[in-house]
Amino acid sequence: MAVADVSAWAAPERTGVRRYVPALTWLPGYDRSYLRFDLIAGATVWGLLVPEMIAYAGLAGLPPQAGLYTLLAAPAAYALFGTSRQVVVAGTSASAVLVGSTVAGLHPVDAGQYAADAATMILLCAGLFLLAGLLRLGFVAQFLSRPVVEGFVFGLAIFVTVKQLPKLFGIEAGSGDTIRQLAHLIGHLGDTSGATLAVGAGALALLFGAERFWPRLPGGLIALVLGIGISSLLHLSQHGVAIVGHVPRGLPSVSIPSVPSSHIPALMAAAAGMLLVVFSESLGAAENFATKHGYEIDANQELLALGVANAGSGFLGGLAAGGSLSQSAVNEGAGARSEMSPLVATLLALVTVLLLTPLFENLPEAVLAALIIHAVSHLWKLAAFRRYRVEQPLEFWVGLATLLGVITIEVLAGLVIGIVAMILLVVYHASRPHVSVLGRVPGVANAYGDAGRHPDYERLPDLLVLRLEAPLFYANAAPVCAQIKRLVGAAARRPRAVVVDVGSNSNLDITSAEKLADLVTSLRAAEVDFAVAEVRRPVKDAAERMGLLATIGADRLFLTIDEAVEALNGRAGSITHTG
């Protein structure tokens, strides 16, 4: 096994403009021997993205060309500004659904207003990405736990699949949440168009068959070409099969959308939610490939790159863009050596927009539905949820609540449910930190460990030595102090003193100081002394400012547990206090 080059883990040395445009670092030194591989990978990615973007445009409620316009900006923008060598940024199913569900909820008066609302939402998201990048808020991805993301994505996969089934059967779609739409479909199966179902089922069989037996073939592109060819040859539109219709040829115009001011709050809220989802998915994909290939990702630069990609797509009338693990895996699997492959895909997309769009006119809607259903089939996270249920049941329920929110209420509401549930879970865990009873580790000088987990550790007579396994702060101060009292009360005999290791604290807030002062007063009223160990300088300074130091006593603050034990046992020759 090759040894990783650890120097690649260091932060990249970029200054000036190069700090914000990584391409100025890698492009001048591009190895021309990579070009053959990047050309093949770029063409492969183009073959995957063209049918997917046309399909995702339908998810967003936008015309097919919107998906193609995305490819003129997003992949190239990320290649120039991003820090991953394998990630491909384009439209994603999650962002398309978020745009579609949000804009549809605003009830725009016509298609023009719908497109303007969609573009505004994407540009607001781009602005938030850029602002977050400049403020170096790359840590925001940590606010969405894996079960929340997986629950949201799983719910989206179900939502999208149900939404596409009417197109597959040639039935008029129902309204309402996912459950109602599915019930509508089942109730109208008698209206199925045989020709439409044959086309859609055939496309699905081709897509899943190619994936299973010929994984290197571009199944999506083959389904697209065959769908257009058969539709044109057999004149399927005359047999009740809905087709895409006219797709304009030529470059899009750059425009700034105009929307009613009353729409801005809803679009801004949805854009913020979309940022979290897109960034979490994109950063996860980027870190996956960076780990595999031995380099580092700059999360803050990723925010800027996604901001530029979405700004470009928004101004051109495209889709919201993000990094996709599946699309990027195709890029890597096709042999991509550098960020050049998405640039190649962009050039091919330009050729498509200028010359090839008339070919899409006879594309059956059922083929697009099949493409979407196949794409989101990989997002059915059954295995992940089975694992969560076994490994961490609480997080499993949080993910399930997110999933159910998406399919029973609406997409953005499901995300909000997941975020709120996760925050409550964090607060729940933080407010109930474990307090360990410590004992001496046999055979190791000055070492103390959890005597509850290691019965052979020697508990100290007359002293109750405790360790806070999480920082003490306002939300957990009262439960921690109550737990310490319970441990004192449950002791076989009343301890002469309590020693608390507060090494996990780097500071102290007012509420915690007040609760500790009350604890000290209560213990000493019961003739139980109190001391703290592993006290850091900021904690001591804060305790002194808030009067807690005077309550505890400066001679009851110690650098280590061993010093506290020696002092309270009266065996210390000289005691070093914090000071």
Image (cartoon, rainbow, N blue to C red):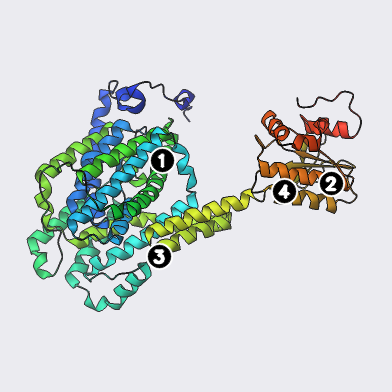
Residue 41 in view: no
Q: Which quadrant holds the C terminus? A: top right
**Alpha carbons under labels 3 and 4: distance apart:** 38 Å
Q: Is residue 108 left or right of residue 248?
A: right
Q: Residues within 10 Å of mark 2 (few under 14, many from 20)?
A: some
Name the residue tied to disc 2: 523
Name the residue tied to disc 1: 283
Q: Are marks 3 and 1 in contact (CB under 8 Å)?
A: no
Residue 557 in view: yes
**Alpha carbons under labels 3 and 2: distance apart:** 52 Å
Q: Position of residue 43 (x, y in %)?
A: 22, 39
Amino acid type, label 4 = Val
Give the image quarter of residue 59: bottom left
Q: Are marks 4 and 2 in contact (CB under 8 Å)?
A: no
Numbered tag placed on residue 409 in the rendering: 3
Amino acid type, label 3 = Ile
Q: Position of residue 112 (x, y in %)?
A: 17, 55
Looking at the image, is mark 2 or mark 1 nearer the viewer?
2
**In the rendered structure, which disc, 2 or 1, sits on the residue that comes first in sequence?**
1
**In the rendered structure, which disc, 4 or 2, sits on the residue that comes first in sequence?**
4
Numbered tag placed on residue 360 in the rendering: none
Q: Are marks 3 and 4 in contact (CB under 8 Å)?
A: no
Q: Residues within 10 Å of mark 4 (few under 14, many from 20)?
A: many
Residue drawn at (77%, 46%), measured in percent from left and top?
518
Residue drawn at (26%, 25%), measured in percent from left and top?
33
Helix, strand or loop at mark 4: helix
**Alpha carbons under labels 1 and 4: distance apart:** 36 Å
Residue drawn at (47%, 23%), measured in percent from left and top?
7
Name the residue tied to disc 4: 480
